[in-house]
Image: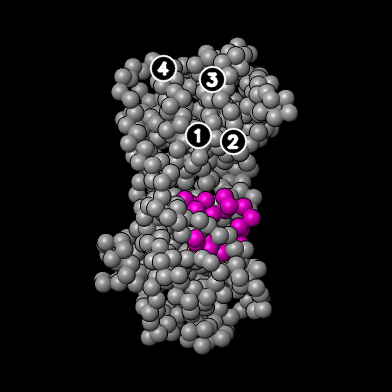
């Protein structure tokens, strides 16, 4: 029988519901269960694809081409289960599907209402495609009490009623603030949050309490009493040193044990946590460190580069080093007379994805700096495209080279491709089309050049990687740069779209059109990140 775990949040946002859900998924998996994790986002956007990265963080792309919430990245990294389009929905998407059906006349004259039509659509999202798992973990975005969240809370309340306690559990994540002046932990915000939840008909079964200090026994009893949960179900969630220690931490506090107890599942086997213990040991005792400059436009919110940060740390784990990040705001390097000292004292440069003109010259300047000084440099998506522009301008001497993403370049070396192939199917993209949905999105295969550096890094000649972009490096750029030591070592299977370039006369300069960071996991670091960090270690030994 499959069971549903609903994870809600209270008191304040940013308590780490995504990590908590992912960690519980990992704990259940470590006990041999099959899990699926889902996120229900109450905002009105159809997906986060058009939201600002500095507000909402990164857009996580799945193999099947969905633009989703960054929490799905945590789910994948913690459980290794590839997220799918059917794992993330929003109010916008729910309403969109209802309205489309209404226009087609599917509702036969009914008056459409939040209850039951919207809640039914949410319930079918939760229940859909879950036959192959033991536990479905559903995280509700936002905090209890948010107006937009109400239909979601109502839908999970109904599911609790319909499926019963043997198939559903409610976990509520709250905060126990500590008042230093009074030297006291405060339970009132948690009590209020649970009161709010109960007022809409949901009694939590487990409280996961984020706290900076251990919960004294009398406070635990008080929370249990006022919130109507068992004292053992008040789980302390202390700040972990590193996110990859959260499963061990929550496991030691009995989170998974309480979940199984609720479902009356007898389990005398402890979870197999070896891989988490070894990650934790490596994190705690690295054999040195390297510093990587990340040159991007959205560095004000590090969440905008969540998967990049994680993939770099996985590369560090693979090489047993700590990776220090040096954030460089790309537009501070835009001007020719800028102070480039931000690029001093680093072992490598990473140019992440991005959009638009601001900071583009700065990224090119950083690419040129890394190329000339022979610093390892990794260009991802926009970072790759702008490296190609830099090479065309400064190596090939074509000063009018540019991308059609901004300005009107005399020689477009990166431009909008109107159609391409996905397997045997032709896909199209139109200039001026809707912003949502005009990108090359999701997994596409690429063929690597035999004997190339990337073929040896991957250890194979066909790969599949996730994409999210509108523009492509043009065939004329390939023609221009190939004779100059720029090897286009990865191409789409039809040979039309450049997917990877590498510089021949450089210790490690690789640009990729896709987002390898999305597929890196702590237990399976992405080979490009492992190799990039190895190159950074080499570089650090030179100085
Ligand atoms: N702006 C570029 C494009 O749309 C790159 C996108 C990205 O880096 N994800 O093609």
Segment colored magenta = 291-310
Is ligand 1 less than 8 Å from the beta carbon at label 4? Answer: no
Q: Which residue is mark 3?
A: 234
Please state which of residues 401 and 65 is positioned toward the viewer in this rendering: 401
Please state which of residues 272 and 10 is positioned toward the viewer in this rendering: 272
Q: Which residue is mark 1?
A: 20
Q: Position of residue 349 (x, y in %)?
A: 49, 66
Cα–Cα span, label 1 and label 2: 9 Å
Q: Are the residues at dot 3 and dot 2 in contact (C-beta closer than 8 Å)?
A: no
Q: Quadrant of residue 410?
A: bottom right
Q: Quadrant of residue 541?
A: bottom left
Q: Are the residues at dot 1 and dot 2 in contact (C-beta closer than 8 Å)?
A: yes
Count up the numbered dots.
4
Cα–Cα span, label 1 and label 4: 19 Å
Instruction: Identify which residue is drawn at 57% across, 22% down.
Output: 215
Residue 404 seen by the camera? no
For disc 2, the neighbor class at 10 Å (few under 14, some 14 to 19, many from 20) is some
Q: Quadrant of the C terminus?
A: bottom left
């Amino acid at each position: 029988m499959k069971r549903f775990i609903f994870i809600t949040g209270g008191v304040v946002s940013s308590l780490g519901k995504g990590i908590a859900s992912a960690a519980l998924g990992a704990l259940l998996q470590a006990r041999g269960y099959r899990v699926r994790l889902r996120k229900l986002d109450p905002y009105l956007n159809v997906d986060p694809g058009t939201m600002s990265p500095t507000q909402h963080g990164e857009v996580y792309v799945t193999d099947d081409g969905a633009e989703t919430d960054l929490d799905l990245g945590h789910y994948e990294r913690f459980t290794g289960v590839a997220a799918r389009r059917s794992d993330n929905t929003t109010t916008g998407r729910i309403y969109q599907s209802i309205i489309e059906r209404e226009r087609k006349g599917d509702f036969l004259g009914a008056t459409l209402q939040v209850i039951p039509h919207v809640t039914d659509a949410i319930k079918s999202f939760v229940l859909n495609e879950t036959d192959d798992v033991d536990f479905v973990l559903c995280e509700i975005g936002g905090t209890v009490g948010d107006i937009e969240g109400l239909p979601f809370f109502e839908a999970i309340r109904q599911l609790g009623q319909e499926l019963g306690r043997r198939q559903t559990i409610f976990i509520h994540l709250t905060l126990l603030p500590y008042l230093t002046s009074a030297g006291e932990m405060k339970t009132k915000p948690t009590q209020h949050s649970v009161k709010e939840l109960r007022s809409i008909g949901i009694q939590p079964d487990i409280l996961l309490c984020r706290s900076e200090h251990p919960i004294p026994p009398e406070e635990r009893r008080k929370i249990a009493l006022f919130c109507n949960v068992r004292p053992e179900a008040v789980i302390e969630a202390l700040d972990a040193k590193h996110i990859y220690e959260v499963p061990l931490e929550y496991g030691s506090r009995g989170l998974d044990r309480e979940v199984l107890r609720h479902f009356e599942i007898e389990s005398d086997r402890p979870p197999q946590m070896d891989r988490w213990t070894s990650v934790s040991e490596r994190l705690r005792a690295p054999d040195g460190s390297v510093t990587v400059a990340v040159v991007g436009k959205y560095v004000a919110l590090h969440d905008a580069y969540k998967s990049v940060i994680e993939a770099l740390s996985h590369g560090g784990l693979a090489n047993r080093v700590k990776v220090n990040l040096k954030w460089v705001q790309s537009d501070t390097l835009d001007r020719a007379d800028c102070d480039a000292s931000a690029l001093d004292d680093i072992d490598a440069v990473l140019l992440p994805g991005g959009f638009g003109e601001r900071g583009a010259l700065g990224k090119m300047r950083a690419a040129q700096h890394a190329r000339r000084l022979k610093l390892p440099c990794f260009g991802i998506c926009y970072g790759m495209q702008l490296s190609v522009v830099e090479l065309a301008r400064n190596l090939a001497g074509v000063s009018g080279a540019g991308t059609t993403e901004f300005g009107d370049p005399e020689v477009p070396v990166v431009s909008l491709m109107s159609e391409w192939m996905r397997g045997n199917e032709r896909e199209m993209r139109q200039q001026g089309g809707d912003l949502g949905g005009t990108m090359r999105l999701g997994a596409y295969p690429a063929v690597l050049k035999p004997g190339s550096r990337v073929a040896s890094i991957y250890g194979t000649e066909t790969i599949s990687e996730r994409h999210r972009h509108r523009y492509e490096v043009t065939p004329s750029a390939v023609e221009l740069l190939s004779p100059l030591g720029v090897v286009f070592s990865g191409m789409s299977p039809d040979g039309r779209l450049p997917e990877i370039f590498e510089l021949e006369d450089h210790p490690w300069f690789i640009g990729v059109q896709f987002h390898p960071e999305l597929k890196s996991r702590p237990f399976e670091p992405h080979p490009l990140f492992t190799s990039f960090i190895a190159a950074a270690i080499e570089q650090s030994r030179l100085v």
